[in-house]
Amino acid sequence: MVNTPVAVVDVSSLALTPLDIGLRMLLAMLIGAVIGTEREYTHRPAGMRTHMLVALGACAVMTTSQLIFWQYRPFGATPDPARLSAQVITGLGFLGAGTIMREGPSIKGLTTAASIWATGCLGVAVGGGYYMVAVVGGICILVTLIVFEWLQKKILHNRYSLYLFSVTCADVAGTLELIHTLAGNADATLNSIHVDEVKAGFKIRFKADFGGRHSDERLRKFMSDLSADPHTSSVTSDRSRI
């Protein structure tokens, strides 16, 4: 029988120093700040500070788990360092749910919710000392949010055509009925309808999705028919960010 030599590890060298803890916290904040800045630049619900706090909190929990392990190990206890971080990953789902909003038939905020969850995961990686995982993961998240968003818009340019309309009219009831009729004829989906009283009568603001084939043609006909209504004094539209 061959005896396999067992490597002896000096566990005291694996204990965390104040410098290690500080570097982990700063790196977690930096990763959260970079990802959150992109979300804030695109006017999403959760921005830089939210992502920074998520990454920092997750890093702090993972670091604390390791400190607990080293503190109680001399007494014969072997606490699981991954237990607390597992609860963080679960809890981030509830935080991300707060960024998800429903506007008519559409749902917004799923990407931001996913970025919060992923940022928390990177914070756990930093807290565990896996710096390469955190840095590469942060770069991959930025590529997904920036590059693939641009690629998605290029590929699906005619599939997603969401426009923000502003209509000034004298007969709000008749104009609303006309808008719904024309939207049905144009195979467009309406949502987020708001009515305000102004000096010229009423201002109706709404979003309409002309996604699908011949979206530009259907949009032009919708605008033309709505502008031709005698009760409508002005119609403006602007392409909305998705």
Image (cartoon, rainbow, N blue to C red):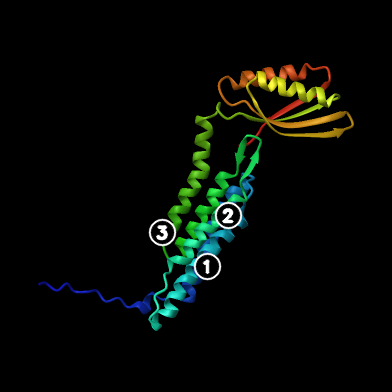
- Please state the horizontal and vertical placement of residue 97, each as a whole percent of the image: 59, 50
Q: Is residue 16 visible?
A: no
- Please state the horizontal and vertical placement of residue 89, each as a whole percent of the image: 50, 58
Mark 2 — residue?
94
Mark 1 — residue?
60
Q: Is residue 96 left or right of residue 8?
A: right
Secondary structure of the residue carrying tag 1 is helix
Vertical position of residue 132 compared to residue 236: above or below? below
Q: Within the image, what quadrant is residue 186 found in? A: top right
Determine whether label 3 and label 2 are within 8 Å by CB. Answer: no
- Please state the horizontal and vertical placement of residue 32, each as a whole percent of the image: 55, 57
Q: Residue furthest left?
A: 1
Towards the viewer: 134 or 96 = 96
Judged by depth in the image, the label closer to the viewer, 3 or 2, is: 2
Vertical position of residue 13 compared to residue 206: above or below? below
- Please state the horizontal and vertical placement of residue 189, each as a whole percent of the image: 64, 28
Determine whether label 3 and label 1 are within 8 Å by CB. Answer: no
Q: Is residue 88 visible?
A: yes
Q: Within the image, what quadrant is residue 233 found in? A: top right
The amino acid type, in three-letter code, at marker 2 is Phe
Judged by depth in the image, the label closer to the viewer, 1 or 2, is: 2
Q: Earlier in the sequence, mark 3 or mark 2?
A: 2
The amino acid type, in three-letter code, at marker 3 is Met
Determine whether label 1 and label 2 are within 8 Å by CB. Answer: no
Q: Earlier in the sequence, mark 1 or mark 2?
A: 1
**Mark 2: few/some/many CA within 10 Å (<14, 14-19, 20+):** few
Q: Within the image, what quadrant is residue 237 found in? A: top right
Name the disc covering residue 132, or none.
3
Cα distance between the residues tagged 3 and 1: 18 Å
Vertical position of residue 89 compared to residue 175: above or below? below
Vertical position of residue 198 compared to residue 68: above or below? above
Considering the image in quadrants, where does the C terminus appear? top right
